[in-house]
Image (spheres, grey):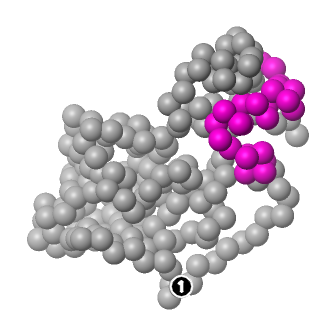
Amino acid sequence: MKTKLGALLRPIRNSRHFTIKEVAAKAGISSSLLSQIERNRISPSLDTLLHILEVYGVPPSKFFKDFETNSKVEIVRKDERKIYHRKGFKYETLCGDSQAKGNHSFNAFFLELAPGQKRGDTKEGHLGRELGIVVKGSAQLLYGQETYELHKGDSVSFFSQIPHVIQNLSDQIFSAYWVVTPAEGEDYFGDKTI
């Protein structure tokens, strides 16, 4: 199996808001070399890869975790879900801890948003993609400069880099299943992320 390291390295650099030039200078390599690595034109030597990971602050063991062959099935029983309560909303985790780690990570949860409450940020987005499936109530999705109505039975998916907010303008609880990828590095229960 041929591994395309560039597909793994570029998202890390983007998530840290580094330019190719900045990383190359800190890693002691040329910008051209890093660009070729990210485009999978060439594979880096082990020394070069270790220098790049050091710049990103990513331990090699963490970077290579996705290549472990010991996969496992994780079942989260309904009464064992982690539940996070904040003012006006609640999250229940749906996926196991190992799914929220690594380069192909995702986080899935059940979201409840009380009437008049909202989650998200109108000024800044975050790396990744999101998928929501509405199971109860209605809400508005503010996505950049656009507004979308969400109702029971609807599904919605979008790139998370665009600033986005979900707001419950109704007098009923809004409930949805929500999936976000990648999971690592994002605070899904904080103030800035849905």
Quarter holding the N terminus is: top right
Instruction: Provide residue 65's location: percent of width, then percent of height.
Output: 76, 53
Q: Is residue 190 above or below residue 12?
A: below
Q: Is residue 30 above or below residue 11?
A: above
Within the image, what quadrant is residue 75 found in? bottom right
Q: Is residue 46 magenta?
A: yes
Residue 12 coordinates in the image, percent (x, y): 61, 37
The stretch drawn in magenta includes residue 44: yes
Is the stretch drawn in magenta largely helix, strand or loop?
helix
Q: Is residue 76 left or right of residue 130?
A: right
Residue reaching furthest bottom?
Answer: 79
Q: Dot 1: within a 10 Å radius of its alpha carbon, few (fewer than 14), some, or many (20 or more) residues?
A: few
Q: Residue at x 50, y 80 (%)?
A: 81
Q: What residue did someone put label 1 on?
A: 80
Picture quarter containing residue 48? top right
Residue at (66% x, 64% y) in the render: 98
Q: Which residues are magenta?
A: 41-64
